[in-house]
Image: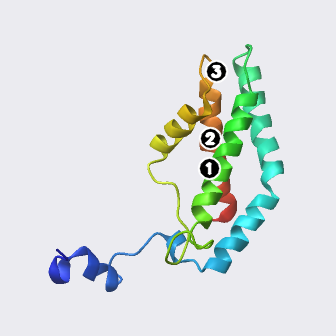
């Protein structure tokens, strides 16, 4: 049911309910934003890894596996770029770019798929989250 004049469909058509900003961007703009973000990928990953490593090694010294954070960061960044560019690539219909919804579930999925386990698994998880955040920040969405 469409709910009549107060229904979701009608209120969206009336622009009373606005879509997320990322869904209003034209495809060429989405592609440009992903390209610009990707150009900064290596530098941002290195900076995030350095900040992560410096914090944990100085505040809570121990034997960490920071490579897991770096690996997770790459997965998160790439996943966010894929979601954002899916419509622009023609894989989905409609304007704009998507963001990863239900991020906690997505991160869990990626953790399980990674096959990683053990005491330092949290580093991979935190890396995934940071990589997603970095892509969206660089893309401005």
Tags 1 and 2 in contact by the CB under 8 Å rule? Answer: yes
In this picture, is 75 found above or below 90?
Answer: above
Residue 26 placement: quadrant? bottom right
Q: Secondary structure at mark 3?
A: loop
- Give the residue displayed 16% in from the left and 76% down from the top: 3
**What is the distance, in whole Å, between disc 2 and disc 3 at their CAs?**
14 Å
> N-terminal of the two: label 2 or label 3?
3
In this picture, is 39 found above or below 116?
Answer: below
Q: Position of residue 68 (x, y in %)?
A: 70, 30
User: Relative to 39, is 34 on the left or the right?
Assistant: left
- Give the residue displayed 66% in from the left and 77% down from the top: 29
**Nearest the eye: 88 or 127:** 88
**What is the distance, in whole Å, between disc 3 and disc 1 at their CAs?**
20 Å
Residue 54 placement: quadrant? top right
* Residue that label 3 marks: 120
> N-terminal of the two: label 3 or label 1?
3
Q: Rate crowding at label 2 as few (under 14), some (14 to 19) or many (20 or more) other CA atoms within 10 Å.
A: many
């Amino acid at each position: 049911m469409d709910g009549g004049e107060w229904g979701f469909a009608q209120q969206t058509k009336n622009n009373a309910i606005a879509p997320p900003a990322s869904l209003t961007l034209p495809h060429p703009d989405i592609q440009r934003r992903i390209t610009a973000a990707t150009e900064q990928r290596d530098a941002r990953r290195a900076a995030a890894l350095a900040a992560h490593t410096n914090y944990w090694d100085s505040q809570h010294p121990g034997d960490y596996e920071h490579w897991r954070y770096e690996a997770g960061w790459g997965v998160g960044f790439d996943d966010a770029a894929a979601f954002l560019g899916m419509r622009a690539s023609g894989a989905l219909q409609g304007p704009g770019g998507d963001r990863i919804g239900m991020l906690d579930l997505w991160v869990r999925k990626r953790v399980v798929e990674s096959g990683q386990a053990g005491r330092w698994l949290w580093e991979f998880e935190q890396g995934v989250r940071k990589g997603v955040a970095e892509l969206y920040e660089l893309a401005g969405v």
